Image: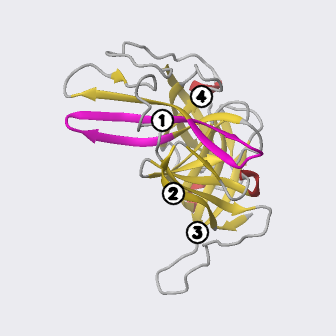
Amino acid sequence: MSEIFNRTLLWSGAAASSCTMSEPVQNFKYLQVLLNGKYCIVPAYSAISIAKICGGAAYWTGQSYLDWQYQYSITNSGKTLSLNNFQMIYQDKSSAPCLFGSAGNRASNIKKLTEVWGVNRVSGTPESAIGVPYTGVGWRAYDETLLASSTANVSSLTLSEPASAFNRIRVTVGTSAESQNSFEYNAPMQDNDKLTVKSYWGTIAATNALCFTRYQWLSGTTVLSSLGGKGFSIGWASANPWTGTGTTSNANWTWRPIYAVYGINRK
């Protein structure tokens, strides 16, 4: 089933670490959060939860921030979104990679929320929303189609139609018991094309893992099969330098993080 993209502004204001939205998250399929100047997708949990969202990368006076992520929770019957911790992997000039960490660095770095939008309403009465398709030459309405989903993380996903029939794909990684994140990629053009996805894992304050998994497209781009991955436990504390090593164990978070695939804008 295809959907026309629409979104409703739930909160906006000066940069903050917490906000109360005008509606609960369960009224929408997911949230679009403007965090640290970048729009990020947040799954629409209907209860208290802890997960992670990516705030993107940055550069400042010789320091390259390779991955900037936030741990968040949704409380107050789905209406309050709060940033709890953050972690940054960075390198200062040619020194060894370091972890910035939340401890002692929270004054301004935790205050990064500026907008929260609800995307694709599933219940409730809209007060204001955008998403009416343009009719001018060259404009096309956004639509997405669920191609595959699984209640458990599996090493191979069979799609209902070829991913190559779409302009882009969106994958959701994680599980309902762990972190959930969504990312968009170019759709494959042919079999044996490769896809590398990033995922974040951890449900408690002390747990934070960053993983990379490689997939391959098969069977006329209707099958997405894992080729393995690597995961890094980086936590939320500072480390200068960071000396951690990754794991390649056969586990959900390293080998099979994808549990849903969407096709975006059919060709």
How many other residues sit within 10 Å of disc 4, few (<14), some (14-19) or many (≥20)?
A: many
Secondary structure beneath dot 1 equals strand
Badge 2 is on which residue?
Answer: 13
Q: Answer with mark 2 or mark 1, whichever residue precedes in sequence.
A: 2
Residue 95 vertical placement versus 88 (above, below): above
Q: Is residue 63 magenta?
A: yes
- Magenta stretch: give its range: 54-83
Quarter of the figure that contains the C terminus: bottom right
Secondary structure beneath dot 2 equals strand
Quarter of the figure that contains the N terminus: bottom right
Mark yes or no: residue 137 visible. Answer: yes
Residue 201's disc number: 4
Give the amino acid type for the residue marked by disc 2 in the picture: Gly
Q: Answer with mark 3 or mark 2, whichever residue precedes in sequence.
A: 2
Q: Nearer the viewer, mark 2 or mark 4?
A: 2
Alpha carbon separation for disc pair 2 and 1: 21 Å
